Amino acid sequence: MLFAETEFVVIGSGPGGATVARQLARAGRQVLLLERGRDWRTHPLYGTYPGAMLYTNGASFLYSREGINIIQPMMLGGATGMYCGCATRPQPFWHEYGLNLDPYAEQTIQELGIAPLPPEQRGRASTRLAECGSELGGAWQPQDKFFRLDQGCALDCGAKCMLGCRCGVKWNAATYVDEAVAAGCQVWTQAKVERVLSEGGVAYGVSGIRRGQPFQVRAKGVIAAAGGIGTPVLLQNSGLPQAGQGMTLDTTVIVYGHAGKEKGNGLEPPMTWSYADDELGVMYSTLVDPWLMYPIITLLKGPAYPLTWYRWGRTYGVMIKLHDEISGQVGQRGRIHKGLTPNDQSKLAQAEQYARQLLIRAGCSPDTIFATPARGTHPSGTVRVGQMLSPQLETEIQNLYVCDASVFPRALARPTVLTIIALGHYLSEWLAGGGEQ
Ligand SMILES: Cc1cc2nc3c(=O)[nH]c(=O)nc-3n(C[C@H](O)[C@H](O)[C@H](O)COP(=O)(O)OP(=O)(O)OC[C@H]3O[C@@H](n4cnc5c(N)ncnc54)[C@H](O)[C@@H]3O)c2cc1C
């Protein structure tokens, strides 16, 4: 058995865990960060199709019992190893829960240079789709991105960068882990935490397995940041069975149409334009699945759909992210129940109609337009603030905090990462100040 002692132990290195670890280490606190995955950034398979299968749960074939495909990356940096690099400011509703995340988000926007891509890099097809969407009445905007354009990259990977960004243009939470280490934080990769240890309702550490060897870490503060699926499972194993009752996924479909002789948006940077329709509760964006994922995703729709693969380069894609209701559950051993409620289905059907009209306006023939099956890339809302967490993100077990997408009280139907980084700043400021305002 491996033993360690520290002041704070952080579980998970996605944007939540990486931010807390960096900020606490910079405040001079002793921190140990535990991550179940590896650091894939310099591995030859990073950013490839086989790589993406290796570092996602269930090789990317994780499904809810109701058939929604859920992508759960597990590696240093968490899901930012595979995200689209989009950013949105925290929603006003956080104030209702006593959290003012706005200053932390603004600070992060400055620090990371978050901004839309310059017009010439937003992609011709994507820009055309956004123009058609605006003509239909939607407020399409250039999407803010976590992109660092000083890396000298031509941005010609298209959505393939969702397999992992090799050139470093997209900010990745693993960078914050590097900065945490530079400030004195210790990191153990391939360390899976199995439970939080507590006595008399007070947390005093964690136990788990690292590379086949059991370990125990004693700590004064425990921060669970294992993501919207990992954190509820961990809390259930630690005496909080109500964790994971209900979740949101920002359930997503992409509506495709054949662009005729025009080039599609598959080779353009993903999601360069977006439109949030808050009245309906959806966000639209410009996106086509990476080349080799397209036939797999479309096969799930039916055997005829992969036959459209030959025209991938001339396909327009409009992504829909749904503000889905809290429903279903993350159960024992991570078994997920999550479908679409009747209300979700009705909103999705309306959103698909809008996307269809947009694609027709952009020149797609109506008989080529179809929507993919539903997917979820934002598992969240499984340990909700206001229900299981205090405004300081503390559970009913004293000194056990949560800081990741699980704390969302409802779906964002928007990019999550900037909000999660802001939550990390908020919590670490509280903890570094000794838990007092
Ligand atoms: C393909 C894709 C595209 C996306 N695009 C965007 C986008 O453009 N913009 C945006 O804002 N969001 C995007 N997202 C969503 C975003 O990346 C996630 O919502 C966000 O990373 C969640 O952060 P988190 O800190 O909650 O957890 P995660 O990023 O999921 O990190 C949790 C970490 O904890 C580790 N872990 C889990 N269990 C344990 C355990 N028991 N012990 C130790 N470690 C554990 C995991 O391995 C993982 O590394 C995308 C997601 C995907 C999959």
Image: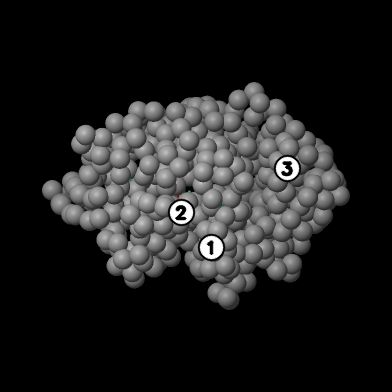
Q: Residues within 10 Å of mark 1 (few under 14, many from 20)?
A: some
Write the residue at 34% across / 35% down.
Answer: 396
Task: Give SS at disc 3.
Answer: strand
Task: Give SS at disc 2.
Answer: helix
Task: Give SS at disc 1.
Answer: helix
The label nearer to you, 2 versus 3, is 2
Horizontal and vertical percent for residue 76?
38, 57
Q: Residue furthest front?
A: 437
Q: Is mark 3 within 8 Å of ligand 1?
A: no
Q: Is mark 1 within 8 Å of ligand 1?
A: no
- Tell me which amino acid carries mark 3: Asp
Write the residue at 52% across / 40% down.
Answer: 97
Residue with the mark numbered 2: 426
- Tell me which amino acid carries mark 2: Tyr
Which mark is drawn over residue 277? 3
- Tell me which amino acid carries mark 1: Thr
Could you tell me if residue 289 is visible in this image? yes
Q: Quadrant of residue 358?
A: top right
- Above or below — where is 232 with respect to 9? above
Horizontal and vertical percent for residue 376?
55, 40
- Above or below — where is 181 with respect to 95? below
Could you tell me if residue 158 is visible in this image? no
Say whether residue 335 is left or right of residue 135.
Answer: left
Residue with the mark numbered 1: 108
Most foreground residue, 344 or 399:
399
Q: Is mark 2 within 8 Å of ligand 1?
A: no
